Amino acid sequence: MRFHREGHGSPLVLVHGLGSRWQVWRPVLPALAEHFDVIAVDLPGFGESPPDGGRGDVPHFADQVVALLDELGVVRPAVGGSSLGGGVALELGRRGIARSVTAFSPVGFYGRGGAKWCQGVVGLARRGGAALGPVLPGLMRTRAGRGALCGIFYAKPLRLDPAESAADARALVAAPGFDIACRELGSWRFAGGGDIPVTIAWGTRDIVLPYRQAARARQLLPRARHVRLPGCGHLPFSDDPETCARLLIEAG
């Protein structure tokens, strides 16, 4: 499993969401690297990590992160996760692998309709990117293009770097692990467990996993810290990098 590593200090593992890659964390990496030994992973079948033939569900991805940590000799890291990666982070916390968890708009707090909505929205973004193909870079260089193509995931898409946005779209389209992970997405529900510090942060303008799901998270995790991210989308790291970095630093 490929990963990016930078910084010094206690370990912090970052896990991206469905169709994404480790680069989604770039807006917060400089601040985090001042405090942590940051390990941002590409899950199997995403980014630069090849598929591993596994189930593609949250427990399987958690298994692969554990195997990587064993290989690196990393024990009891703080874990941050986004969307699908938020579910992986919570699973690692439930297993006692993580010393703390910070999950941004995590999967697992929806009903059947919410899971299908998430699968449909991200799948539509992937098909749209595939259809646009070679014109993606040019569209991402325009304000209208970034607004239309990235507004699903970001509340403030005009802040995004055009080249990075095009690369993210290409990674979503090309991810060989997407289909199985998308299919398995609705099969996992958070069922509690674990006794570590947990922070759940949710953007109020999240289209993919709407903010109303945060109420379910509060019910199932009454002792967790629940943070509302006003004006942020599903991927809040460029919408409000200062707050996202602060939450990870405080939890770590």
Image (cartoon, helix red, strand yellow):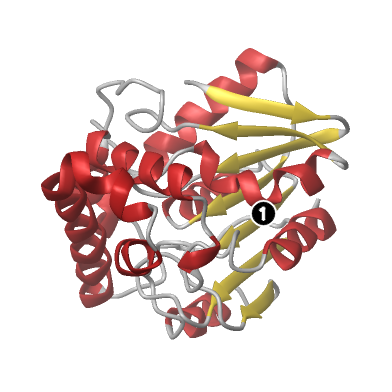
Instruction: Tell me which residue sits at (45%, 39%) in the image.
Output: 21
Q: Is residue 144 left or right of residue 35?
A: left
Residue under label 1, please give it. 101
Say few, some or many: other residues with alpha carbon within 10 Å of mark 1 (under 14 / 14 to 19 / 20 or more).
many
- Residue 14: image quadrant is top right
Q: How many marks?
A: 1
- For the residue pair 148 and 237, the one nearer the viewer reads as 148
Could you tell me residue 37's position as x and y percent?
79, 31
Could you tell me residue 124's position as x and y percent?
17, 60
Q: Is residue 93 left or right of residue 212?
A: right
- Residue 12: image quadrant is top right
Residue 41 seen in this snapshot: yes
Instruction: Tell me which residue sits at (54%, 82%) in the image.
Output: 219
Instruction: Tell me which residue sits at (74%, 28%) in the image.
Output: 6
- For the residue pair 145 and 245, the one nearer the viewer reads as 145
Could you tell me residue 66's position as x and y percent?
56, 28
Q: Secondary structure at mark 1?
A: strand
Q: Which residue reaches farthest top? A: 71
- For the residue pair 40 and 114, the one nearer the viewer reads as 40
Instruction: Tell me which residue sits at (33%, 37%) in the image.
Output: 171
- For the residue pair 159 and 34, the one nearer the viewer reads as 159
Residue 21, above or below 242: above
Could you tell me residue 198's position as x and y percent?
69, 62
Residue 179 seen in this snapshot: no
Q: Is residue 220 left or right of residue 20?
A: right
Residue 175, above or below 106: above
Q: Amino acid at mark 1?
A: Val
